[in-house]
Structures are given as C-alpha cells and as structure tokens.
Image (tube, rainbow, N blue to C red):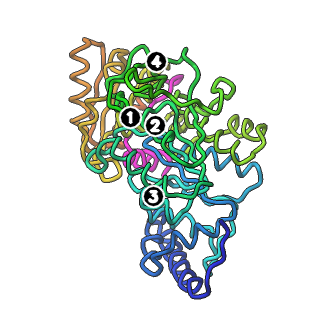
Amino acid sequence: MGKKIKLIDRLRLGLAVSVAKAVTLIVRSLGLGAASVLPGSIARRIEPRLLRLLSQQVKNGIIVIAGTNGKTTTALLLCGILKRQGYRIAHNSTGANLENGLMTALMENADFLGRLNVDYGILEVDENIVPKVLQPLQPRIILCLNLFRDQLDRYGEVDTISKRWTKVISTLPLETVVIPNADDPTLSYLGQQLPQKVLFFGMNEPEQYLEAIPHAVDSIYCPSCGHSLDYQGVYLSHLGDFSCPRCGFSKSQPSLESREWSQILVGLYNKYNTLAAVTAARELGVDEGIIQETINNFQAAFGRVEDLVFNHKRVRILLSKNPVGTNETIRVVTQSDDSTTLLVLNDRTPDGTDVSWIWDVDTEKLVQRGGTLVVSGDRVYDMALRLRYSQELNQSNLNLIVEEDLAQAIATALQHTPENETLHILPTYSAMLEVREILTGRKIL
C-alpha cells in the first residue's frame, strides 16, 4: 500500500498511462464508447506489470469484490460509503471487470506520469480471473459474494472456481481480510480453510425462507465430505442455513445481525449486497451513521433495478443473466401488481453463448400470473419456447408477444403497460446495454 516506484519503472509506467489516456480521449471524442477496456489493453503491452505498479500506489489498499451476482451493486454502495466518509476512490464503475478493465479504472485516476493519488481502489473482478489478479493487486480486503452457475461455456462448475480461489487467497499476506458469504456453503467452507482474518456476512431472518429449494440450485452438497446438506431453510438458490449430518460442517457465524440493517433497492439479493458492503465498511472503521445514510440514499447502477421514465411511462430494468439472478428478478416482478414484462435474451460474449440455462429458470411463476409477456433478443425464439412450455403446463391466461426487433419490442411492451403501472424489463447483460441505449440515447460501453 502506497509504495514508491523505481525511476525506470516510473518512466515505463508514465509512457503506458500517457498512451492509454490518449486512446481514451480519442475513443470518447469519436463517441465510440466509454473506453473502459481498450486503454488497458494497449497500456499493458507497454508495461506488462501495469496492474501491480498502479495498485501498489493506492494509499489504503485495494478492495476486491468477486462473485457471480451483485458485484456492481455492492461496489457502488461501498464506494458511496467511503466517499461520504471523505475518501478518494478508484473504481471500475462501468463494470469492466477483466484485467484490461481493472487497469483502465486505475489509470483513470493517475496523472500522465503514472502517479496515483487515491485512498482506496474498489475493483469488481470477474470470478474466473480472481486467481490471476490477486497477486499483483495484493488486496487489503476480498469480498466473496456468492458462486452460482454462470456462463458454463466459460467457467464450469462452482466448486472448481472455489478451489482455485482458496489456493490463491491462502498465499496472500496474513493481513489480508477475507469477507465471504456465510450462507453460501462453498464460500462458508472457503473461509473456514483460510489462515487470514475472515469476517462472514449473511442472513439471520428465518421468516425470509423460501417455501422450497428452487429448481436452479447449484451447491447443496457438503464441500467438505460431499454428503447432502441439511437445510433449515433457504433464502435464495442454495444460500441459507445449513449443516452436514455426516462431518459436522455448518454455516459460519455472520459478523452482523442482518435484521439491524436496512437494505438498498428491492429484492432479497440486495440485502446480501448491503450486508457485504456494510461488513467491509465497518472493518475499515467507517462511522455507522454514514453507512446507514448512504444506504438510505443509494441509487442503483445502470441496469440493476434501475428506474427510468420513457414516453411518460415508468420502466424498471432488472439485469437477468443466469438462473439464480433471473429467478430473483422474477420474484420482484411477481410481488408487484404490474401486468407487463419484457424479457430480452442475447447470447453474445458478455452473456455466455450457452442459453440452455433458461430451462433452469422458474418461468412458470411469471407465466402463472397472466398479463402480457413480450419477448425479444438474439435468442427470442428460445425464450418464447420456454415461456410457451410453461404456459401449456399451467394453462394460464397469458398474452405472449414475440418481437425480434428490440426497439419495436420496447414500444409494444409500453403500449400494453397501463399509465399507473411499471414496465419491467429483464435483459441479459448485452441486451441491457441495448435497452438502455434505446431508452436513454446513450451508450455505456
């Protein structure tokens, strides 16, 4: 933290950062995007150790936020808390969470000599590259939010990822603080194996249990011995209160009482995001009044429970990129009185090219309530088939509209949305960017 850099390294770093800043200026001036990835890609060719040289200048250290769901929202909340406390923050706010995106975020806050003057770096990191970046980053805190199946064509199963995480985290300095989700069996076990200081976050609210374990459940077996876990109850997917009847492994004790903290936004998944950020902020010594004030005034990141007004109609965008996340956004929709929903399914690189995960989504709950469902996206007919299958099983009174053109799909969905209701849009990641561009007239990436 805050280390000095040798002169020769400073010269190479300065050249790399200067070139990156020039690229950023060109890309943004031409309206080609946010320049959140390309500058890092070019700069690392000039100085391969760029990530290490930048991160070691951060005065109070790097905070890594990793997991399948909730990274952007948790990072944004923690940024807000620390900024309200008066700290200067470097953050990959566009969600570019691969190596080039991390470098670009740090360079944004550096001068043309590569000198970084920030108190904390808050970096949301794609779960698959965590083992590659932890050593150069040498983080002060690692937040481990959850592990769900996501983009199986890229990542594989969650236990493979957790083993890789454990291996690399255990080699970090003992001063590193690790904050895993106690309600996720895989991460709870991970935390119990580490030599570093570990603080857990999780729920203590049995009244929030689901009626049954969802179909899209990932990890209900003991990570220690492989036996089926006994669940007292689940909050979402495989997150809950559990123990192993064979080896005695059980849920770790959270450091916070979840009932004592209000949450940001809607949906139980955002209670987890809140608890994760609060646990980190308390560890950093932030005043609890500031933490609560930030929670009360929090505004969502783009596409994550984002509320907009378009053509005098209310629109809510709920990013839905994997089975667990989509089940939770469906829960938000079904708990409302709104009758129109737009689902947009893409299969591009940011989404994962394997869309078979939609068959693990409990679309039956969405179909059962009736109303109007509009479907669009690159894989519009895959999603339409999934919904039609659910409709035939439930014999629901559903108005299902298939529209290949996204702009027309949005217009159609808005036409079916009464003046006093909200249109819910459930898009995958690349689809969310397209939806926002149509609604706001601005690109994000």
Q: Earlier in the sequence, mark 3 or mark 2?
A: 2
| Magenta run includes residue 436 | yes
Helix, strand, or loop for circle 3? loop
Residue 224's disc is 1
- Pair 4/1: label in front: 1
Task: From the top left corner, tell me how far across and down residue 438 is, in percent.
Answer: 43, 47
Q: Residue at x 72, y 39 (%)?
A: 291
Tell me if mark 2 has few (under 14), some (14-19) or many (20+) residues whose alpha carbon lies within 10 angstroms of its own: many
CB within 8 Å, label 4 to label 2: no
Residue 231, given in percent of the width and then of the height, sits at 42, 19
* Mark 3 burial class by Cα count in 10 Å: few <14, some 14-19, many 20+: some
The CA distance from mark 4 to mark 1 is: 20 Å
Which residue is label 4 attached to? 233
- Is residue 376 shown left or right of residue 276? left
| Mark number, residue 445 | 3
Q: Is residue 283 above or below residue 323?
A: below
Q: Are marks 2 and 1 in contact (CB under 8 Å)?
A: yes
Find residue 56 and name its label.
none
Q: Which mark sits nearer the N-terminus, 3 or 4?
A: 4
Kind of residue at badge 3: Leu
Residue located 51% across and 25% down the image: 419
Drawn side of residue 393 relative to residue 26, left or right: left
